[in-house]
Image: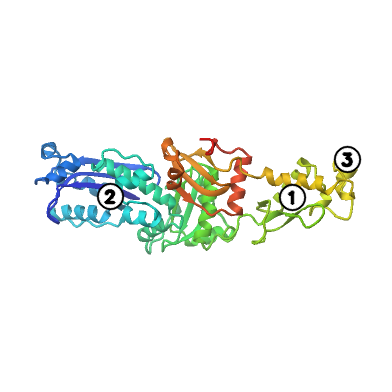
């Protein structure tokens, strides 16, 4: 749980400032669950330059609540939370100072979006809140007012969480929250989980991620882990201390995210997907007169037309290609190269198995398979659902190479290449990601495709 915070002050000498406005948004990692926004009577003068900057003057604060009147509400809304602010050291210090004046020691963990941005957005030209969020296509209103800056910080933090593929933010938070503490009942874990599509992270008592999974229904899948009796389920049940999650909005991004983050984090219980999702491939052998299609276990150095999770799926795809492109089974690993294929007797093969068809004519048809597997456009966006509230997702292809994914709410956030790339969560372009994206395009599992060269 996070408390996104912004504070405006009177200015003045160090530790003599007073709060003039405060905004806090309690954020559970997916949505805002509580909020506070209020002017505050600081019982002291506001510096002229601060008045000009914020537009807040003493007349506006005469009838505003004093800090002690808001203190209890502030404690309630931040309880159990990590404070998140842009330049968190300042906001946290001011909050502590005000509570100290009341004789109360306010303590909390904090995260600074300036430091996080410097790490996760190293190409940004400026890390000032206004400049940074505008460069990311995040709308900001009422600049230098607590509610406007807090909302912009919230949207920035959402983006940073998404870009944090190694999960350093959430792992550090969970480690602090659950140090030496394992939940007694799994029921409490299940109740906090959504029945929506996304990626979930199972943590041990030290906060380490021990398992990453994807599901269309996170709650149901985690429940299966906690009630199952197979070896993996038993290991999870012994080590589980907490489950965190990130909603994805659609299956394509959930699969891309799961695959990428398993490889980045290599959780101890993710043996099957730790190194490769697609173990079998169909390779084109052009060393023979008639080009041959070979199904084999994926070898890292070799190129493949397509890759699959198992041999059964590869066989099914190859048979479909044989039918669709009128190919000879004997010129594939499914047949015997020294015998006429079964299809030749049924007149479904043009005779490559017995030398009746020219190699050039046959090989041209084989090469059409490669053409059929290309992306529809060289530069494109695959648009699909996001996580509600008008949000959409995109998968970005640049120069026919997969780049990654991102989310947006307003069309202007993806109108230029720079805007797309600032909102992008980069993912390695490899056989696994190519296979996933091509699969969703082939099955038309998306809302629309945008040809960026035609825009």
Residue at 67 percent of width and 59 percent of height = 302
Towards the viewer: 168 or 299: 299
Task: Report, in whole angstroms, how far the alpha carbon at label 2 lies from the one at label 1.
Answer: 56 Å
Q: Nearer the viewer, mark 2 or mark 1?
A: 1
Q: Secondary structure at mark 2?
A: helix
Residue holding disc 1: 315
Q: Residue 421, how many percent across, how many down?
A: 45, 47
Determine crowd level at label 1: few under 14, some 14-19, many 20+ residues with C-alpha closer than 10 A.
some
Towards the viewer: 389 or 134: 134
Q: Residue 68, how many percent across, how many down?
A: 15, 47
Tell me, yes or no, if residue 316 can be seen here. no
Tell me, yes or no, if residue 414 can be seen here. yes
Q: Residue 399, how many percent across, how many down?
A: 56, 47
Residue holding disc 3: 347
Residue holding disc 2: 78
Q: Earlier in the sequence, mark 2 or mark 1?
A: 2
Residue furthest left in the image: 44
Q: Secondary structure at mark 1?
A: helix
Q: Residue 314, how many percent across, how many down?
A: 71, 51
């Amino acid at each position: 749980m996070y408390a996104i915070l912004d504070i405006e002050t009177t200015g003045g000498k160090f530790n003599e400032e007073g709060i003039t406005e405060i905004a806090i948004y309690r954020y559970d990692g997916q949505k805002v669950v509580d909020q506070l926004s209020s002017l505050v009577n600081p019982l002291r003068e506001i510096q002229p330059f601060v008045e000009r900057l914020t537009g807040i003057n003493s007349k506006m604060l005469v009838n505003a609540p004093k800090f002690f009147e808001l203190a209890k509400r502030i404690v309630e809304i931040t309880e159990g939370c990590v404070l998140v602010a842009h330049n968190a050291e300042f906001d946290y210090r001011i909050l502590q100072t005000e509570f100290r004046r009341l004789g109360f020691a306010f303590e909390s963990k904090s995260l600074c979006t300036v430091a996080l941005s410097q790490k996760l957005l190293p190409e940004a030209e400026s890390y000032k809140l206004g400049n940074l969020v505008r460069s990311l296509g995040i709308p900001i209103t009422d600049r230098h007012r607590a509610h406007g800056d807090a909302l912009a910080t919230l949207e920035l933090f959402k983006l940073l969480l998404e870009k944090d593929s190694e999960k350093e933010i959430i792992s550090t938070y969970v480690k602090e929250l659950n140090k030496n503490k394992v939940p007694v009942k799994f029921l409490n874990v299940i109740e906090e989980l959504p029945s929506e599509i996304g990626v979930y992270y199972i943590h041990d008592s030290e906060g380490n991620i021990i398992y990453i999974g994807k599901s269309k229904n996170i709650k149901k899948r985690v429940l299966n882990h906690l009630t199952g009796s197979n070896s993996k389920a038993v290991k999870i049940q012994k080590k589980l201390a907490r489950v965190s999650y990130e909603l994805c909005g659609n299956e394509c991004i959930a699969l891309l995210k799961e695959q990428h983050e398993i490889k980045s984090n290599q959780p101890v219980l993710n043996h099957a997907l730790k190194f490769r999702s697609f173990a079998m491939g169909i390779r084109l052998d052009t060393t023979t007169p008639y080009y041959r299609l070979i199904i084999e276990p994926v070898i890292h150095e070799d190129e493949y037309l397509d890759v699959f999770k198992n041999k059964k799926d590869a066989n099914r795809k190859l048979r479909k290609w044989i039918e669709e492109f009128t190919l000879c089974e004997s010129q594939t690993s499914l047949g015997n190269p020294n015998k006429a294929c079964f299809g030749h007797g049924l007149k479904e093969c043009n005779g490559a198995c017995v030398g009746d068809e020219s190699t050039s004519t046959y090989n041209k048809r084989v090469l059409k398979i490669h053409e059929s597997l290309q992306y529809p456009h060289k530069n494109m966006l695959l648009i699909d659902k996001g996580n509600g509230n008008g949000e959409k997702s995109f998968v970005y292809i640049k120069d026919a190479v997969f780049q990654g994914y991102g989310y947006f709410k307003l069309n202007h956030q993806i109108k230029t290449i720079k805007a797309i790339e600032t909102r992008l969560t980069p993912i390695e372009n490899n056989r696994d990601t190519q296979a996933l994206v091509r699969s969703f395009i082939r099955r038309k599992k998306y809302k629309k495709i945008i040809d960026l060269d035609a825009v």
